[in-house]
Amino acid sequence: MAPRTVETPPTAPARTALTVRYFAAAADAAGTTQERLELGEPTLAALRAELTERYGAPMAKVLRSGSFLVDGVVRRDRGALTGADRGDADAADETSGTPLTVDVLPPFAGG
């Protein structure tokens, strides 16, 4: 009798949960000031794509000239969200390596 093979079901890809807070024009575009999101890829590029897909042209306009505040650090790049992936353990949640909060900031007038 041949050995029995047990197949394990495929696991869903890991998703990164984060709180996204919106300010000024970003809040207007999203229609809210805060929400919880999950991303399949924990990068600012993935977050930009998700927000543009959800909220369309008004959010895309904000994101073109605005910035993100990732756990207190201003970011305009498209790189990793998690502190561990950025090599910045202090900016990451100690248990999961994911950011606690990402703020979407519109461009501000003045210097």
Image (spheres, grey):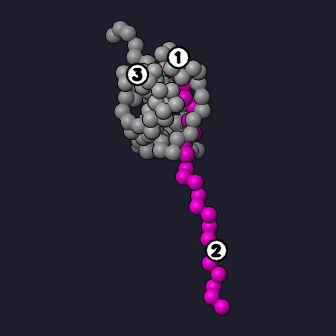
Position of 9 compared to 90: left or right?
right
Mark 3: which amino acid? Lys
Q: Nearer the viewer, mark 2 or mark 3?
A: 3
Q: Which image quadrant is residue 32 in?
A: top right
Residue highlighted by disc 2? 6
Residue placed most toward the observer, 43 or 8: 8
Range of the magenta residues? 1-23
The residue under the point 40% across, 29% down is 75
Q: How many marks do you count on the picture?
A: 3
Q: CA distance from mark 2 to mark 3?
A: 51 Å
Q: CA distance from mark 1 to mark 3?
A: 12 Å
Magenta region, mostly helix, strand or loop?
Answer: loop
Q: Residues within 10 Å of mark 1 (few under 14, many from 20)?
A: some
Q: Which residue extends farthest top?
A: 110
Residue 46 at x, y = what percent? Answer: 45, 39
Q: Which image quadrant is residue 80 in?
A: top left
Residue highlighted by disc 1? 28
Residue highlighted by disc 3? 61
Q: Which secondary structure, mark 1?
A: helix
In the displayed structure, 22 sits above or below 52; it is above
Mark before the other along the chain sequence, 1 or 2 = 2
What is the quadrant of the N terminus in the image? bottom right
Q: Residues within 10 Å of mark 2 (few under 14, many from 20)?
A: few
